[in-house]
Image: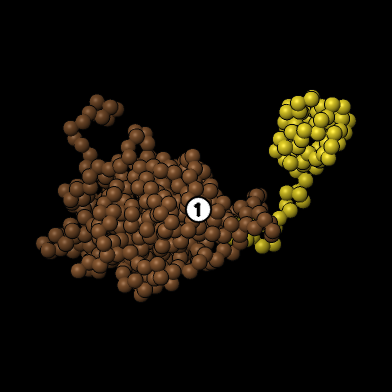
Chain colours: A brown, B yellow
Amino acid sequence: MLKGRMIQGCRAIAETVSLCRPKVISAYPITPQTLIVEELASIVADGELDTEFINVEGEHSAASLVLGSSATGVRVFTATSSQGLLLMGEVVFNIAGMRLPVVMVNANRSVSAPLNIWTDQQDSMIMRDSGWLQLYAENNQEACDLIIQAYRIAEDHRIMLPVMVCVDGFVLPHAFEVVDLPSQKEVDDFLPPFKPIYSLDPDNPLTMGAYAEPDKYMETRYMIQHAMEASIPVVEEIAAEYKREFGRDSGGLFEKYRIDDASTVVIAMGSMAGTIKDIVDELRAKGGKIGELRLITYRPFPKEALYEALKGAQNIVVIEKAISLGGSAPIATELRSVFHGRPENPRISGFIIGLGGRDVTVEDLKVAIEKGQQKLTDAEFVGLRTDLELEGINA
Amino acid sequence: MKITLGMVTPSGGSRANKTGAWRTAVKPRFLQKNCIACDVCALSCPEGCIFGTGQKTYYANEDFCKGCGICASVCPVHDIEMIPEGGEDA
């Protein structure tokens, strides 16, 4: 029997954040993140969490506020989506550059224009180069587990970088699922109070994120890249510890699903990975040698671990809810670079699916998997409508 | 030298680096005639480099003044004027 209780994703996420005892929360509501913030506001208003919940006039302020609060040496939380994440943009980079262990939940949503409030992963993908770690959840249980782990990873003195926990908008925060939330004591035991290396204090002033001329700036970027690479074993270590303490496989670099003898491996992030597992089971039952690798940690991109996990495959089918416009399918592109110049060199095909909340159907996923086994595709859209005239293309 | 995580540096850097060298071609001259010690020039200075303790005592520390002219613009009694660099001392 499943342990836990039937709960809406947004509430489960908010309760998990509360269990992590942030001292400052600031966020601006934006669909589909809004319910998370509303639930947190309720928790604070009900006196269940001793925190400062600070309302602001927009996401740039929300990010700035958690930046400043984190700099004083306290644990902080924020959440956003889409346009909100874009508005936070420069602060997102500042938080990473100042090495502040902020944790943010991004409820993945498409980017305007045209205005569209539904889910895809273009928003967080844009922030991949910002110096934040990015963890993608498949379901609400994992979203909650990742938030707890995210604070441990971010605040680890070997890392000291912010972490973005990405959840597919609506599909996770608005869904009711059974989620097993740990007790306060369990979380307290796993997640000790934040111990900053540096913190702002009026009695002992210092400057953070100071000016760096060309003689120093480059070293700061090298240091972040180094910390990113160093975080790969830390992500694994903390996921292993989490499993020991909470009895659940959650987090880590990626999840391998029936890939050991697979000649075809499908790669995906987030909620559609569950649907793909069903397809894998169906194709396996017919004798297909197919499996799935669900990427959880997209930043840092776990290059060596991916090579080792995938080197036995002949076809890798990467199915993504994002596109680098004018470029290619982002994860497929990076995966190709992992295999470049190595002895094993499987075919890596990229497919774009489910943008702007278009349903990711079993049929469309099967189309991508079938095509990826037959030919090399760069960034092929699947699930496009054929009944429309598209000006400039066929009209 | 050590580069710390997040480029954390000791306090006092803003005082040590005399950024007045970036000043535009003008600087304020405090006329010391009509001053009512309202403090608006000091409060408005984006560099925080205007000081005074009473009527007709205000001055700008030229080691930091950028010559923006806000003080001259906000002075309610027109007791500050902007003069060319190299002119009479403020």
Camera-nearest residue between B68 and A321: B68
Q: Which residue is at a point 74% across and 53% down the rendered structure image?
A: B12
Residue A221 image point, x, y percent: 56, 55
Q: Which of B70 and A21 is in front in this view?
A: A21
Residue at the extreme bottom:
A244
Question: Furthest-front residue in view?
Answer: A46
What is the x, y in percent for residue A379?
Answer: 30, 45
Frontmost residue, A302 versus A4: A4
Q: Quadrant of the N terminus of chain A?
A: bottom left
Return the x and y of residue A383 as percentages of the image width and height.
Answer: 21, 42
Residue in the picture at 53% in, 48% down: A65
Q: Classify residue A46 as left or right of residue A318.
A: right
> On the rendered structure, is A271 left or right of A99?
left
In depth, the one of A42 and A24 nearer the eye is A42
The residue positioned 41% from the left and 62% from the top of the image is A19
Mark 1 highlights which residue?
A52
Q: Could you tell me if residue A250 is visible in this image?
A: yes
Q: In which quarter of the image is the C terminus of chain A?
A: top left
Name which quarter of the figure residue A149 lies in. bottom left
- Given the image, what chain letter belongs to the residue carrying mark 1? A
Q: How many labels does the image show?
A: 1
Position of B86 with respect to A39 (left or right) is: right
* SS for dot 1: strand
Q: Where is residue A69 in the image (x, y as percent from the top left)?
A: 55, 53
Residue type highlighted by circle 1 = Glu
How many residues crowd around disc 1 within 10 Å: few (fewer than 14), some, or many (20 or more)? few
Q: Is residue A358 above or below residue A2?
A: above
> Can residue A240 be seen from the camera position used here?
no
- Residue at (50, 53) in percent of width and height: A52
